[in-house]
Amino acid sequence: MSIRDRIRGFIVDTFFVDDFADNDSFLRKGLIDSTGMMELVAFLESDFGIKLEDKELVPENLDSLARVVAFVERKQQPQRLPQAG
């Protein structure tokens, strides 16, 4: 199952919504409130094995399915260490 499908499934099962597009704003559409955002963050951390920093808890990363998927994909990429030289 893809990252997108796993996250969409969580949102549908947890918040009882299924009529939303990948780019719909969760907050503007009223799909997920601030408490729900914390549930989403907990799910992302446990299900995808990532840690979200406080500075990452912004709409640019978390306010639509498309943004969440892109954010998780970035977080899962191996961290590049600075090269000595």
Image (tube, grey):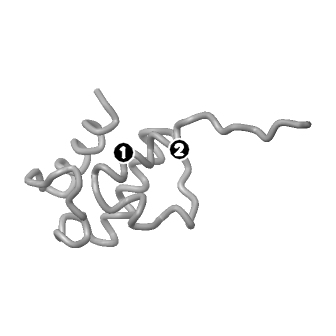
Figure check: 70 above or below 15: above
Tag shown at residue 75? 2
Residue at the image position 39 percent from the left and 66 percent from the top:
59
Image coords of residue 78 (percent x, y) = 61, 34
Tags 1 and 2 in contact by the CB under 8 Å rule? no
**Residue 35 picture location, percent across and down:** 33, 70
Specify few, some or many for label 1: CA neighbours under 10 Å numbering under 14, 14-19, or 20 or more. many
Residue matched to label 1: 69
Left or right relative to 48: residue 1: left
Q: Mark 1 falls on what kind of element?
A: helix
29 and 84: which is toward the camera:
84
Assign the N terminus to one quadrant of the image. Answer: top left
CA distance for labels 1 and 2: 10 Å
Which is more toward the observer, 7 or 16? 7
The residue positioned 56% from the left and 66% from the top of the image is: 54
The kind of residue tagged 1 is Val
Name the residue furthest left. Answer: 19
Amino acid residing under circle 2: Lys
Residue 51 placement, left or right of 72: right
